[in-house]
Structures are given as C-alpha cells and as structure tokens.
Amino acid sequence: MASDFAGVAFKITQFSPSQLLQEGDVLNLWCNATNTCSQLTYNWFKDGQLIATTQDYRKEKTSIHDSGIYWCEVISNQGSISSEKITINVSADTLEIVIQPKFTMVLLNGFALFLCEAKGPAEIHYQWYKDDTILPNENKTELKIHVESESFKGMYYCVVSCLTATRTSDFAYLQITKSVPENISKEVCQATDKIALLIGNEDYRSERKLKATSKDVKLLSGIFERLGFKVLSLLNLTLTEMKMAVYHFVELLNNGVYGVFYYAGHGFEVSGDPYSYLLPVDAPTGADITACLPAQKIHQLMLEKNPALCCLILDICRTICEEAKYYSLPLEIKPNTSSLYMYSTSRGQSAFEPLNGRMGNFVYVLKDYIYSDDTVETMFGKVRRAIAINSKILQEQGKRCGNQNPELFSNLANVNISLADQINTTNHTQEYNIRSELWMQANRLPRMTYVDIKEFGAKLKIEFSAQFSNVMSITVTIVDSGTVPDCYAWIANIPSTLTADKATVLQDDKKKIRIVVKDLQKLQEEMLAIIRFVYTDESGNSRCRVEDLHLDFPLAANLELCKLSTELLEMNCIQKKMS
C-alpha cells in the first residue's frame, strides 16, 4: 500500500505472511520497519477496523470469525506507511469427509467394497445405509458386501457423525453384472460412439436455489461413464454458456452415434406454446423465455447430425405460464425415427426434490433402472411406473411431494436400442478418434507435479481431480518437510473470474490441504495461481515462500463457453408478441 506522504524516509522490511489456520490455532502477526528519525507507532487493522496498537499482534485461540484481511500501519513524525495486505483463513475444526464411496460394479456372487473416511474434532462414528435403510453392525470406514443376489443392487452411502456435527457421504450405486446376457435373442444394436451432455443448474441468481441438482448430475455422470458414454458434466451455466455447451456437444454427434442430453434445474412451459424452456443461472425473475433455452431447439440441432439415438432427459418443472410477452417461432424438426424425450413430470406439473436436497425424486428412481441392457423404451417405461408408485407412497407418508407423473415420447424405429449397447467403430475409426480428441480436450486435467522448495529441501506434491467438467479439486501434500518440520502449503490467488471454496485441511498436521475451484468455463486466459508455503522459523515466527503455478486451461476451460459465437451457433427462435 502507498505511503500517505511523499518521500517518507522509513520503510517496512518484514511482515507476517498470509496463513491458513484451524480453529484454536494461535495467530501471530508482526511487522518491522526501519527509521532513524523518530519513534514508530504500529497500528493493526482487520477488514478496515483497528484491532491493536502494538508492533506484534497475537491471538491465542482463533475462530472462524478471525478470518479476514489484515495489515499494519506504521506511523512516524514524517508520515505513515502500510504493509501489504495479509489474508488469514481460519477453518472450522468440523467434520469433513475426505474419502467418498464410489460407483461399483461386480459380478453376481462377487464382492463389493465401499470406502468412506472422515476427519473431525472428536471421535468419529460411521453408519452405512442402503436405499435409506440402515445396515446393522456396518459401522466401520469400509463396507464389504458379498453380492449373493440381485437384491444387493442399490444405492449405498455412509452417515458420519461426531459430537458436534453429522455428514452424509456421496451416494454410490452398486450394479450387478452377469457373465452371460440373459436375453440373447434380442437383436444386437451397436453405436459408432456414445456421447452425453449433462447440465445441472442450482445456484440461481434470481430464482430459488436448488439443492439436489449437483448430486443428481454427479451420480448420473458416473453411470453414463460406466455405460461407455463420453460424458461432459457441467454445473451452473449462464445462457451463453449453455448455448456453447450444446454447440460443442452437437459437434460430437454423427451418423450412428448415441446422443443423450440431460438437464436438471428450473424450467417451465407457456400456454399455447409446445416448447419446454430451460433456465440458466443468470435468468431474471419471471417467465422470460428470451432468457431461456428451448429444449426443442437442442433437439433440432441434434437431429441435424443424424444420430442413431437422439435422447433428451429433462428433469424440470413443467408448470404453465399463462402470460408471456414473447413466443417461439415454429421449429422445423427434421423427419426422423431416432428421437426420445423423457420428462421427469407431465405438462402442467412440478418436479420435486426432497427438502434435505439429497437427491431429486426422478433420479432417485432412475438410478435403479438406467444401468441395464433393457431397451431404452422399456427402461424408461419402468422408470415411469416406479416414480408414479414412489410419489404415491411419499404423499401417503405426508412428505413434500405433489403429483409427479413422468412422460415418455418416442418415435424410435429401432425399438431394440439400449443405452448399454456396445460401440463398434468399424468404418468409423477416423471420426471416432477425432471425436475422442475433442472430448479429451474438455476433460483434460493438469498432470500431477512435484515442487521443490530448495531453500529448505522440502518437496510438495500437487494433485488434480475433476468433480465435474467445470469443477476441479487441487490437493497439496507435503511429502518431505526438509529442514522445517512445522510447515504447510496450499493453493491461493485463484483467478477472480473463478470461484474457489475455502481450503480444507485433510490431515490434522496440515500436511495435506485441498481447495475446490468452480466455474472453470469462465476462464478466459491461462490459469495462474500460487503455492503458499508457510513455515515456522527458528524464532517461532511464521514465514512464507511463494511459488508460481501454471495450469494452462484445465477441463472445460478449453471450450471457451463464455464466448458465444453467433457464426457457429444461431439458437434464437423467439419473437416478441404483437400487441
């Protein structure tokens, strides 16, 4: 920060580094300045408020309320000068799940293993569940199952608790496979490739925020990957980003390809208008179709590529807006025999998610049927029946759920198509390879790397993983502390266009720290961040070393979804009504 007076004859030579603390840790801040003319006065500020008038500031037991921006002002008879701003993040010493159970597929009579591990401030207890039913005596970090029958198929999760908190793990589906197909008489269908785009919008700026959408997308992404689909999963997109995501998805379709578009989020329909409108996160309040994406436009664009399967799964409300200032122009849908729409509810009805936000009612049922070799029409037919039964049961139990009756529309000429069909690239190898390269660009993570802090002989390991195609976690592990055993490191200075969660300590000694970076699709230039390496010197003071970290364009940042190209994609089919 600049001095209040020009030509001040003193300067700050040392000050505290930014720090990552846990509740109960000691906060030590100090500042040293040189001056030969007069006595110096030190003032410490937090978020603009004066908190101390001493050269050093110390707080014995920190809490999350101590997080903030600190700096020191030094005053002499010649003027004042301030230190650089110091960021202090204090993480609550709360319960955190650090290893989540994963989708598992086993043969009948085989063994399945689920893992769940947590860290917390007190003794931790584990309890495993299957389909919301408690599993007696299953209270360890791992759940091992002997899969003796089809009844073991289902959704497993773990509830982790301590004295101060309770957490629920991710949902992990157990799928049972058979070594020999049961229905060998069914005509064998094959795809030249299988592509799925899944979009989940929940963090709305003007509409009610949703809770279960990200969980639904994460679960279905894993299932589609197991079915052999190339999956692009995206959260919280604006209208421009949705349009560009659809454009890139459609570019991957071609003759013989199975294409699946899944959307979960707010939606609505308009009286006298046959279309369904999908709301982006930046949509204004009210039924303004000019700020939405018509699902039927996506259908039209998909059909232009002649896919063998053009499947849209829309998990939206379909309540009717009686008045609208705009209307959609009629869309010329290409004559075809490859289309299938699966709506989570009927026209005029709502789609529901539980108040706890754990999973939407539609996906709660869909997960039990989608991973199968049933024909796609048969599979969705089973889903319709099961949801109708499930909705009735929930209403009888007095739970928040109105009528939710899914609708299925299909004109498939090949009624034997299944989402589990194999891929055969014969005579399509070149286009398959091109498609694979384009898909990998949108799912490419930075490589794991090691960083040496040569001054102290310390070594850091930086690891990356994708939670969605536009959400990445970065974990820093100190594999060798060198000559400074009391040290830790984390990633900071994430570009301002992105969103980053507060760093999470995965080990009690702070040797492993993770952050989650969201909205990667908004990145407009190479991602640059820093590694903050904080250590305690011989005098007991915290010091910091900074290393640059170049991450290029990770995951969906490669797609430049925030830059709408009207030359590549024209999706406007909406006109204003005449008064």
Image: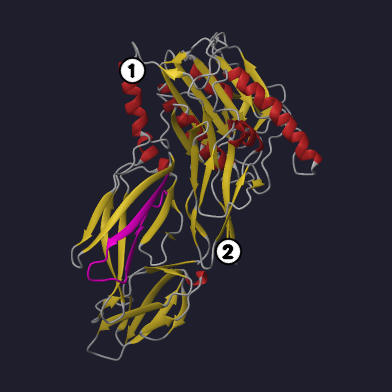
Q: Earlier in the sequence, mark 2 or mark 1?
A: 2
Total numbered circles: 2
Position of residue 28 measured from the top left corner of the image (x, y, whole percent): 38, 78
Question: Dot 2, crowdedness within 10 Å: few (<14), some or many (≥20)?
Answer: some
In the image, residue 554 sits, relative to residue 312, either above or below, namely below
Q: Quadrant of residue 491?
A: bottom left
| Residue at (26, 56) in percent of width and height | 548
Distance between the alpha carbons at the discs numbered 2 and 1: 53 Å
Inspect the image, locate mark 2, and give the three-letter code of the amino acid beneath it.
Cys
Q: Which residue is mark 2?
A: 162
Q: Quadrant of the N terminus?
A: bottom left
Q: Kindly identify which numbered label has been placed on residue 431.
A: 1
Quadrant of the rendered image containing residue 483: bottom left
Secondary element under disc 1, as helix, strand or loop, is helix
Image coordinates for residue 310, horizontal then vertical, percent: 52, 18
> Residue 479: within the magenta?
yes
Residue displayed at 54% across by 46% down: 170
Mark 2: secondary structure: loop
Asked if the magenta segment contains residue 418, the reply would be no
| Magenta stretch, residue numbers | 471-498
Q: Position of residue 5 (x, y in %)?
A: 30, 77
